Amino acid sequence: MRVGIVGYGAYIPRRRIRLGEIAAVWGADAATYERGLELHEKSVPASDEDTVTMSVTASRRALARAKIDPSSIGAVYVGSESHPYAVKPSGTIVAEALGATPAVHCADLEFACKAGSEGMFLAAALVKSGEVQHALAVGADTSQGAPGDALEYSAAAGAAAFIFGSSNLVATLEAQVSFMTDTPDFWRREYMRYPRHAGRFTGEPAYFKHTLGATRMLLEKTGLQPKDFAFAVFHQPNGKFPMRAGKLAGFRREQLEAGWLSPWLGNTYSGASPIGLTAILDQARPGDRILMVSYGSGAGSDGFVWTVTERIDEVRAAAPATRDQLDNGKLYVSYGTYAKLRGKIRMGE
C-alpha cells in the first residue's frame, strides 16, 4: 500500500528573544554563543501557549491542507518532552479539538527530541497496516534550559503536524528506519525542573553517531545516494550540527538550507526536524525527493525518505507557510519578560 503525508502544518510563536539579550544578563559573550552554536535568536511561547495549544494549531493547519473529515483520523500521537500534564494525555485534548473523537486511538510519546518523528513512524505504519484510514502525528515542545546554561540559548518552542493516509498524498513515504543505542547524553529525572546534558559528549558519540547511522541505513535500504535528493533536513539542536551532519553524509549546503531554521528559531526539540520538513514542503516541487533524519537523546534517530507528488501545489495556500511565520510578525522580548513567560521566576520556594 502506498502511504504518505496528506496534510501538514506548522506553528511558530511570534515572540522571540535574541541571544545577546540572554548573554547580557549572565555576563557572557554573545558572539561566542552565536559563533559556537550558530544561533541568533529563538522563539518564546506566550503565557497562553503550551505544547497542546501549539499542537492544535499545527494540526488544524494540517487538516486544512488535507481536506479530510477529521472523524476519519483513527490515531493521534503527540510527541513532546514538555507535555503540560504529568498525568493526563495531550493527545485526547488535540483529538477533541479537531473533532476526531471518540473512535480514535491516542498516545503521548516521549523520546527527547525525536518524540515527534516517533509519532510519524507509528502513524505511517498504522495506516500501512490498514488499521486506520488516517493518522495524525505531532511534534511539539516548549522546553527550556536552566538559567545561564548553554541550553537556555537554544531551547525554543514550535510544533509540526502531519496527517498520514494512503490516497491524495502530497508526499509519498518511500522508506523509514530507526537507529538506536543506550547513549545517555541528555536527561531529566522526575522533579528536576531543567534537563541536564553531557556537554561535548552530546556531539560525536551521540548526535553524529545516530544521525549519520540512520542516514547510512536509509541510503543502503533504498539504494539512493545524496545526489538523488533535492532536500535533506537533520535534527537541529543548534545551527551548526545539522549542517555539519549533512556535509559528513555527503549533502551540499543548497540541499540543506530550505529546512535549516535553527539560527532564527532555536531548538524546538520534538518539532525540530519535522518543522524543517514543513518548510521544505512549502517550496518543494513534484518529483523532489527529501531525506529527513531526527535525533533524540537517550539515544536514537528516525530516518525517512519522501517523494513529493503533484498534489503539493494544490494545498500550500490552505495554511500559513513556515518561513512566513519564522520571518514575519516577530515580537522581541526582554530577558525579564522571557523569564516571566517561561516561569523562571518562582516565588515562595
Image (cartoon, rainbow, N blue to C red):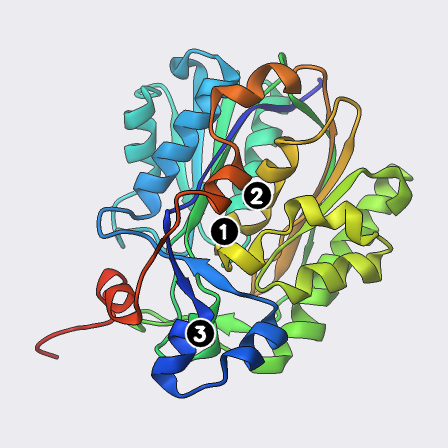
Residue 184 visible within the image: no
Label number found at residue 270: 1
Q: Is residue 124 above or below residue 180?
A: above
As helix, strand or loop, the secondary structure at mark 2 comes to helix
Q: Amino acid at mark 1?
A: Ser
Q: Residue furthest left?
A: 348
Q: Tell me the SS state at disc 1.
A: helix
Farthest residue to the bottom: give it: 27
Is 99 displayed left or right of 9 in the figure?
left
Residue denoted by label 3: 20
Decide: is 326 above or below 269: above
Residue 257 position, x and y percent, is 70, 49
Q: Residue at x 66, y 31 (%)?
A: 283
Q: Position of residue 332 (x, y in %)?
A: 35, 58
Q: Amino acid at mark 2?
A: Pro
Circles 3, 2 touching at the beta carbon (< 8 Å): no
Residue at the disc numbered 2: 274
Contact? badges 2 and 1 (CB < 8 Å): yes
Q: Quadrant of the N terminus?
A: top right
Q: Is residue 327 visible?
A: yes
Mark 1 Cα shell of 10 Å, populated few (<14), some (14-19), many (≥20): many
Tag 3: amino acid: Gly
